[in-house]
Image (cartoon, coloured by chain):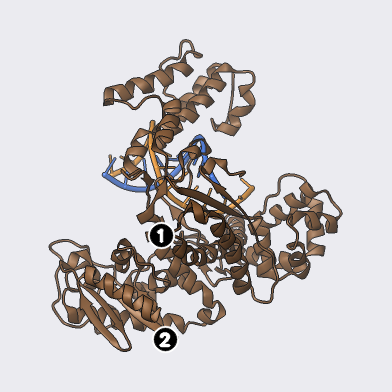
Chain colours: A brown, B blue, C orange
Amino acid sequence: MSADLLALVSAPPSSGVDLTALVGSSLRWVGPATQAAQRVADLETKLSPRWVWWSARTDAAATVRAGVLLRRCHDLAEVHRLLYGRWSAAPEDVWATAHGIPLDEVAQAPPDDLFAVVDESPRLVGQDGLLRGDALSGRWLNTPERLIQWAEAALTCAAHQLGHPRSRAAPLTFATESATALLCLELERDGLPIDRSRLEALITKVAGERPLSLADEADRRRERDALVLAHAPGREGTDLRNPAAVKELLAGAGIEVPDTRKWTLEPYAATSALVRSLLAWRAAERIATTYGWRWLDTHVGADDRLRGAWTACDGGAGRMTAEAGLHNLPVLLRPGVAAHAGRVLVRADLGQIEPRILAAVSADRAFVEASAADDLYAPVAARLGVERPVAKIAVLAAMYGQRSGAAGEALAGLERAFPQAMAVLDAAYAAGLRGEPVLTHGGRLVHTRAGPSSPVPGSDPGVDRARGRFARNAVIQGAAAEFFKAWVALLRQRLRPLGAEVVLCLHDEVLVHAPAQHAEEVVGQLHASLSEVGRWWFPGVPVRFVADAGVLSRWSEAKG
DNA sequence: TTGACCACGTA
DNA sequence: CGTACGTGGTCAAC
């Protein structure tokens, strides 16, 4: 396997040089980025290597920009995050852990300013065995020889990571997390296709016409406010954006509430015109401020694509994150997300993914059997002798720790019927109580204690229980995230020959922008990839995974 | 200017 | 006393 490793590393912008190095067992090449992209494309075709880089963002961006699709990669930063449960994954950190040096001994990288002292020694590794901190932040990395050293260091780290015990326990995770980081760059490059005029119409409907000036914008704002304040005679000066002032306003109208949240106020909407107008104001204000004209101008390009920064994993259980509202676009605006001419959106989401993941990671025989059904809760309900809604609440309560509602007696039934599945959740909860980290199925280390300065386990029962809930959730949500990423990573490869791209990942949902004539093939590939990944990810555990897929012209057409 | 809190959108 | 994320508002402390 290691014979296939090929390093691809680039000099950082601060180095002032345009150099990229390609280094493998029988290759040492350094050149400018444009030439590198061509070489990389050739090597990908001829050798299909596993590309090694410090991180996709620092080393593979030019390749992605050139439109070259790389299939297999090893992203040192993502694997570092996975193995050690830390967000920070700079080369110095990666190097230290790969050489068994505690992370506390890694000095903070010096600030990248003009006054930084540049050590001109030719060595990359210091006397202390640490990678020199200024290699990336300073200008040191500015000659072909040094870039070769940089690439060799990456290969050394990759070998160490691949030799980690958890690499053998979950061989697919490294590849998946790495491919996801690359996919993140592709998502940023391609963007989410939108129908500009439709999006503009939707924003206009809620927030009003595009303001022509700052004064105009302020007028619009006052007009929106006036609609609410008209219901509050004598209190027209209330600042609706200040929750304390709103609370006072409501009290003046005889409505005493602990806070002014939507769900707190909703019961009063039926009887109070003030509350009704306030809630409507909030909805409009949300669009006007967060998803209004400024948002459109900032994040939607001239090519009618919505773009934001993506990350392959968050700081917790490992879900993908996205900025620019890509992960929390209000349903109201979804008609504005639409395929471009000659194309369609193919949408798919994983059905009941979290209980199915619980079945898979626990290998609980009865629970795995239940996953054979299109609706997993039906056989669970039958086995427990309860109605389906009760069974559903009980399963969700077991996974998330919710105690409200009538899940109590059904929970006891779950313990009897699916002891192995419940044991997985209980073990995670117990680890969290003790402040210990947990491992996801894919081998991600998830810390339950923020750091040495956070409360000692046992000192605060509330904190302990919160850590327990977090841990119980992390083993499910984390494994689901890994599985989703594995699905999309495979899809990403299969879609390329069809001229289709993944344009949105939303935890358990994926949107593909595809040529219309290939729509059905994409749908077939969504299902085929899913069952393949299920077999790879959980060998010998015949859990059934299901996806609901559809061909749409607008995102809003989804059954949801 | 920064960090805390509120509030709310998504899964 | 489900969990998690990103965003934009206000306020109090600098």
A254 or A351: nearer the viewer: A351
Residue A69 as seen in the image, left or right of residue A470 = left
Q: Earlier in the sequence, mark 2 or mark 1?
A: 2
The chain holding disc 1 is A
Residue A356 location, x and y as percent? 67, 61
Residue A374 location, x and y as percent? 73, 56
> The residue tagged with tag 2: helix, strand or loop?
helix
Compared with A445, A287 (above or below) is above
> The residue tagged with tag 1: helix, strand or loop?
helix
Circle 1 is placed at which residue position?
A: A184
Quarter where residue A499 is shown? bottom left
Circle 2 is placed at which residue position?
A: A2
Specify whether disc 2 shares its chain with disc 1: yes
Task: Calculate the distance from the C-alpha at mark 2 to the C-alpha at mark 1.
Answer: 25 Å
Residue A20 as seen in the image, left or right of residue A534 = left
A240 or A212: nearer the viewer: A212
The chain holding disc 2 is A
Outermost residue on the front side: it is A517
Name the residue rendered at 77%, 56% in the picture: A411
The type of residue carrying mark 2 is Ser
Compared with A429, A265 (above or below) is above
Residue A395 location, x and y as percent? 72, 55
Residue A285 location, x and y as percent? 44, 29
A496 or A478: nearer the viewer: A496
Quarter where residue A522 is shown? bottom right
Name the residue rendered at 45%, 14% in the picture: A235
The type of residue carrying mark 1 is Cys
In this orientation, does residue A101 appear?
no
